[in-house]
Amino acid sequence: MQLTGLLMIPFAVSLSFTAIAGGRQKSPGPATVRDTITREGYTLLIVNNEPDFNPRTRQRLIDAFFTVYPEEAARFNKNTLKQVTFFIDPTYKGVAETGNGVARYSPTWLKEHPEDIDVVTHEVMHIVQDYRHDGPGWLTEGIADYVRYVYGVNNLKSNWTLPDYRPGQRYTDAYRVTARFLLWVEKNKDLHIVDQLDAALRDGHYQASLWVRLTGSTVDQLWQQYAASPSLELKYR
Ligand SMILES: [Zn+2]
């Protein structure tokens, strides 16, 4: 999930207060633990407010970040942030959300779904995306799940797969439905469709006509073609 700038402000302000770089230190609060890890030019700051957060899960999130974030940056946005914050927040009722370089995770979700490590892969793509201009939310989330499919490190073990096409779906359904459609367009129409859409969304030049320019068809026409012949040979790494 991606937060809008407006929604993000209170969270960002509160976190900037706590986001003091440098090693491991206890905060004045009883539970907060901060760690800063740097590898090959990227820095991950972890702000953990859950004392019982599984250290194995924590390490897997870290390892996933340092695997997928450089890959996502290399392909989509070399100017993406060099420092990212993970906020483990027991008060957060969702699964994960990202804005302003901060990805917030629910420790409750990760306790109940310890294999769902690729929430990282999806969330940090929102940082790489850095879509400052208004674009369709379904496409933003579809691209993030496309990236989770392509770069995810643990999708099979977490039983995260792209659902087969079913009548009634729409490309505007976002997330995995849109991700699978993007893979189909990539395979059948334009190998660089996602790169082009992503760049246009970041530049603020995205328009629906971009689909026509890249593929010769409108997105609605592409969806009709997809619905008529939706087969894909999916492979998870
Ligand atoms: Zn998202």
Image (cartoon, grey):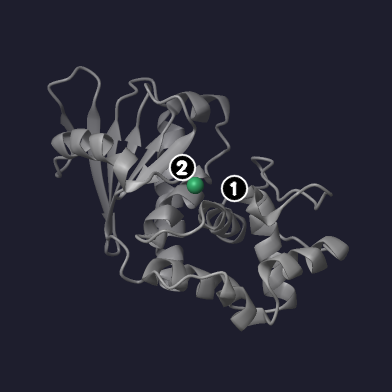
Residue 154 tag number = 1
Q: Tag 1's secondary structure?
A: loop
The numbered disc on residue 16 is: none
- Tell me if residue 30 can be seen: yes
Left or right of residue 72, residue 10 in this image: left
Give the mark count.
Answer: 2
In the foreground, 45 or 177: 177
Percent across and percent down for residue 128 are 39, 61
Q: Residue at position x 80%, y 51% from top?
A: 164
Quadrant of the snapshot with the C terminus: bottom right
Q: Amino acid at mark 2?
A: Arg
Mark 2 is surrounded, within 10 Å at the Cα level, by few (under 14), some (14 to 19) or many (20 or more) other residues, namely many
Residue under the point 34% across and 23% down:
50
Residue 62 coordinates in the image, percent (x, y): 39, 46
Check disc 2 and report the residue beneath it: 60
Asked where in the image residue 193 lies, by quadrant, the reply is: bottom right
Locate residue 6, reporting x and y percent.
30, 43
| Residue 171 location, quadrant | bottom right
| Vertical position of residue 186 compared to residue 108: above or below | below
Q: Are marks 1 and 2 in contact (CB under 8 Å)?
A: yes
Residue drawn at the location 72% of the way across and 52% of the way down? 170
Q: Position of residue 155 (x, y in %)?
A: 63, 48
For marks 1 and 2, give the CA distance.
10 Å
Mark 1 Cβ and ligand 1 under 8 Å apart:
no
In the displayed structure, 4 sits above or below 78; it is above
Residue 199, image quadrant: bottom left
